[in-house]
């Protein structure tokens, strides 16, 4: 499974989005507000899950981190840049 699909699966599992499938999550769509509609609590949970699964360091409350969490595509780029 590629990183993109792993992230989508992680979003579904860590946030208990049982009625959403990997195919429902658009790679370029925003994860927050208008896109998938996640909130700040979801961001914390997703951040912890990503740190644990991909062993990356995530700076809390930084503008750069907000940009990394914009979409699945930006998360893929961030994780790949950390390897």
Image: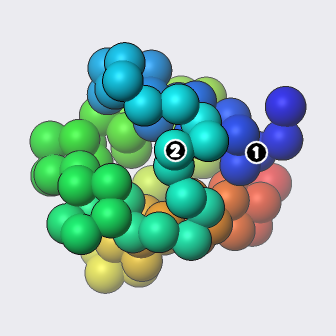
**Above or below — where is 12 with respect to 73?**
above
Image quarter (top left, top right, bottom left or bottom right) of the C terminus: bottom right
Q: What residue is shown at x 37% (from left), y 59% (from top)? A: 31
Give how far across and how far down residue 78 sits, in percent: 63, 65
Q: Is residue 36 left or right of residue 25?
A: left
Give the crowd class for mark 2: few <14, some 14-19, many >=20 residues within 10 Å.
few
Residue on which the image places disc 2: 24
Which image quadrant for residue 64?
bottom left
The answer to which of 19 and 54 lies nearer the viewer is 19
Give how far across and how far down residue 54 sits, in percent: 66, 37
The mark that comes first in sequence, 1 or 2, is 1
The answer to which of 51 and 69 lies nearer the viewer is 69
Marks 1 and 2, Cα distance to the nearest angstrom? 16 Å
Q: What residue is shown at x 24% (from left), y 69% (from top)? A: 34
Q: What residue is shown at x 36% (from left), y 24% (from top)? A: 19
Give how far across and how far down residue 67 sits, in percent: 42, 77
Name the element at disc 1.
helix
Q: Is residue 55 left or right of residue 57?
A: right
Q: Is residue 51 visible?
A: no
Q: Is residue 38 visible?
A: yes
Give the crowd class for mark 1: few <14, some 14-19, many >=20 residues within 10 Å.
some
The answer to which of 28 and 40 lies nearer the viewer is 28
Name the element at disc 2.
helix
**Above or below — where is 2 with respect to 60?**
above
**Above or below — where is 73 with respect to 3?**
below
Residue on which the image places disc 1: 3
Q: What residue is shown at x 56% (from left), y 71% (from top)? A: 28
**Residue 15: numbered disc:** none
Q: Is residue 44 left or right of residue 47?
A: left
């Amino acid at each position: 499974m590629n990183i993109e699909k792993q992230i989508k699966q992680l979003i579904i599992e860590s946030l208990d989005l049982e009625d959403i499938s990997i195919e429902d999550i658009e790679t370029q769509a925003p994860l927050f507000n208008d896109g998938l509609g996640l909130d700040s609590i979801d961001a914390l949970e997703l951040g912890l899950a990503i740190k644990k699964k991909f062993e990356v360091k995530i700076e809390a409350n930084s503008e750069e981190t907000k940009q990394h969490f914009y979409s699945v595509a930006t998360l893929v780029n961030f994780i790949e840049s950390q390897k």
